[in-house]
Image (cartoon, rainbow, N blue to C red):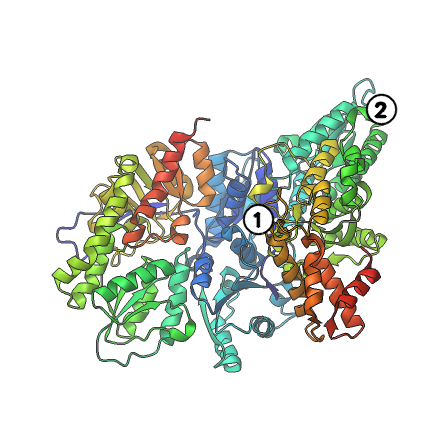
Amino acid sequence: MTRLIPLAPGKACAAPPARVVLRERGQREVFCGLTSIMWLHRKMQDAFFLIVGSRTCAHLMQSAAGVMIFAEPRFATAIIEERDLAGMADINEELNKTVARLLERRPEIKLLFLVGSCPSEVIKLDLGRAAERLSMTYSPKVRILNYSGSGIETTFTQGEDACLAALVPELPAAESAAPELMVVGALADVVEDQFARLFDALGIGPVRFLPSRKSGALPPVGPNTKFLLAQPWLRDTARALEARGAVHLPALFPLGVEGTTAWLMAAATAFGVSPALFQAVTEMPRARATRALLRYNDTLAGKSLFCFPDSQMEVPLARFLSRELGMRLEEVGTPYLHAGHMADELALLPADVRLSEGQDVDLQLERAREARPDITLCGLGLANPLEQEGLTTKWSIELVFTPIQGYEQCGDLAELFARPLTRRTRLAV
Amino acid sequence: MQLTVWTYEGPPHVGAMRIATAMEGLHYVLHAPQGDTYADLLFTMIERRGKRPPVTYTTFEARDLGYDTAEIFKRAARDAYERFQPQAMMVGASCTAELIQDDPGGLTKALDLPVPVIALELPSYSKKENWGASETFYRLVRGLATEQPKPGASRLVRPTCNVLGPTALGFRHRDDVREITGLLFQLGIDINVIAPMGATPADLVRLPAADFNVVLYPEIADVAARFLEKEFGQPYTRTVPIGVGATQDFIAEVCSLAGIEIPDLSAFASNLPWWSRSVDSNYLTGKRVFIFGDGTHALAAARVASDELAFEVVGLGCYNREFARPVREAASALGLEALITEDYLEVEAAIARLQPELILGTQMERHIAKRLGIPCAVISAPVHVQDFPARYAPQMGFEGANVLFDTWVHPLLMGLEEHLLGMFRDDFEFNDSAGASHLGGHGAADKAAEIGTAAVDAGEGAIAIVHWAPEAENELRKIPFFVRGKAKRNTEAFARDKHLETITLETLYDAKASYGR
């Protein structure tokens, strides 16, 4: 099923090109929202994610993680069994017991997320009420929240959005009268620290990050809070923050030199930083990042790119690869296109690029085969089959696990795309 | 409700995918929500397949629930047929679709597709991956195998058999098939059909034409073989040819089913018997080994470990309860209690308690082994990308026995090296914490001893902690690192038994005398 729908132009765009988005509905070769737990559980160090689901959910977590590097990760699955469904066991009672066993085993947990799955949603297991009920037992030692990472409602990174949106009501009210900056979206610690140093040098502060590394240090929020989105998949979280009075600072996402500069600039403008100071603070890292990108120019310039939908990072990535490395865009597919948050990004894409939202994987594969791009960004299920057909691929999942945001990571990000191409040229077998 | 960190088996529809992906000309339409496509990467990444599994997922969403999920299924099934033109289709539901009860079988029937359609009922909330694979293969065989055996087939032609059980994502299935079909051919037996691996639905129709069936993997093919025996009078093999002894038994069984003489076996010799008898292997004697995997591979490993390498099996278990009974019997014959569990933390605790010198397990036990610093070899699914080697490395047959010898023995110290380490452990230039030169994990050994003991202590939290007197601790350090963990554990247990608060030099040697080696 394919529909062509004109996308409302972004407000940041002075003379918006008339964009047509190809919307498809069919088999989707993407992860569900549970998969976000892979990075969230490393980021939030005293939180635990208990998926209430099926053996499939547990198997997904294990397979998508690839290797089981953690003896006991900070996530687990409470597998619903036949007796729970048949009413032979009271499922809420079973959940109480499971949580009790878990908390006994892991006394260091301060924040527990009950994470809904496709089966728990379909049987209408009310995890919101379960969280309330369990909170009464374990509060204040353990805070218990819930969100859904089910595949029938969320695609991959939307799981993080749902998780952070569930955290927003828990944020303390901001008390200070001075404006505060909040950076929203999980970033690698190293990137977070770099941004914190840059904001500090710009004199912007205090700066707080959501999610915080410790659940006891959740950032306060209020009408004086201005927030930057560090990740493009945070629709519900942004809405929830706005509902608490916070103000969104629209910007490009911090990928590439241009994206990072625009992103920092949005905060600098809102906090009244002088252009001279901004220039002075960003000049060095900007030059360094530009130099780092230069190394990949020969490999990537003029090469064509085809993005299968995966993380919602596709549009900012395409903007970076086309504008800073001279790549040609065949198709930019994304699971979900947020017209508002993507307005600045879309304005910078070439007018003729094919944008697609959603997926019918067989049809999209046909387009990719016809386009024969130099590099295809796709998920792990498609990568080897496309390589076998002679197409060079880049695994999209690496983009959510690797630090790629900010100036110091520009070169790393370009390298991720250059490596498969270089490899192909080097191999003589 | 079951609290799970890691699982040994996936859901049953993944078992069905292993059958579908192994075959040609078959397509599987799976009623499933977004996200269940993760299963594709098991095949494309872990097994490095260059083709997508032949599976279409309907990908329904929350907003579809309640009014048109059945329509979505019908459209997906029709489109899949038109696009892939399979000889036969399988239809079924994943765990979520099972709850919405759309009846994929009935819906597909209404489409009136011009090919056989096999409807799968795989209860996701009570069954698991191996059961799903077995049930799927049985349904396919039952639905498709119709050709009657040729009456009174002439004995002038060679006897024929089918080889049943190899699937996609199986542990060394590709190489086992090559090894065993080669062996059968040399015995004078022709292959009628190999299934599911490489078979088409049309091939399954021809299954009854063979004289008998060879079941390589009972977890997958036992049910189908029983059906073929009952329906078409085809007997089937019970011996799984892993190890030299089992391969010899298998040859005898196969020859008897084929009605032929057992040929002279010296032409098919394995190196294992001599490698095991040569003097370097002396050091393998009584090595304490812990075995865990699927029932079939764990049983086979126990036999090879004790009879063909003279290891001492100190733990034996499996994760698939369907095969618990023979594993329990084998364990009790070895004087052990079998560990039948799907809880990986329980397996880890058992290993930490037993402090084996070698672990033969799945990829889960490999992770446990890495953490505890114990050598490990993988003998069973679930497996990871490194268990699909580029080289030929069967587990079955005589070449398989060679592979077993190498892969189980190489993680251990070489005999002469172990001897030298013992001899020179007091040499001032020799730092035993560096580990053996041919093993990667330098310095892992000390950690092993400590971690192992810590885990034991944690498990017996109520027991009073025993202290080491400094001179006893010094003496303990002189013991070669590869037995230090065991010595420490034995001494502490000894001290607890005797209600001693402090371990002195005397205690250490009393304990040594009491435990032997």
Tell me which corner region of the image, top left, top right, bottom left or bottom right, holds residue B300: top right
Q: Which is more toward the observer, A373 or A368? A: A373
Looking at the image, residue B330 sits to the left or right of residue B5; the answer is right
Looking at the image, residue A195 sits to the left or right of residue B291; the answer is left
The residue carrying pointer 1 sits among few (fewer than 14), some (14 to 19) or many (20 or more) residues within 10 Å by Cα, namely many
Which residue is the site of mark 1? B92
Query: Which numbered disc, 1 or 2, marks the residue that appears first in the sequence?
Result: 1
Between the C-alphas of marks 1 and 2, the distance is 49 Å
Q: Which is more toward the observer, B45 or B145? A: B45
Q: Position of residue A337 (x, y in %)?
A: 30, 53
Quarter of the image that includes the N terminus of chain A: top left
Q: Which is more toward the observer, A198 or B44? A: A198
Asked which secondary structure carries label 2, the reply is loop
Q: Position of residue A325 (x, y in %)?
A: 25, 41
Q: Name the mark on residue B426.
A: none
Q: Position of residue A366 (x, y in %)?
A: 38, 36
Tell me which corner region of the image, top left, top right, bottom left or bottom right, holds residue A382: top left
Task: Please tell me which residue is depicted at 39% across the width and 47% down the height of the picture.
Answer: A396
Q: Position of residue A202 (x, y in %)?
A: 20, 65
Looking at the image, residue A63 sits to the left or right of residue A253; the answer is right
| Residue B205 sits above or below residue B416 on the image | above
Type of amino acid under label 2: Asp
Type of amino acid under label 1: Gly
Which residue is the site of mark 2? B264
Asked which secondary structure carries label 1, the reply is strand
Please report contact status of discs 1 and 2: CB closer than 8 Å, yes or no: no
Q: Chain of mark 1?
A: B
Q: Is residue A186 visible?
A: yes
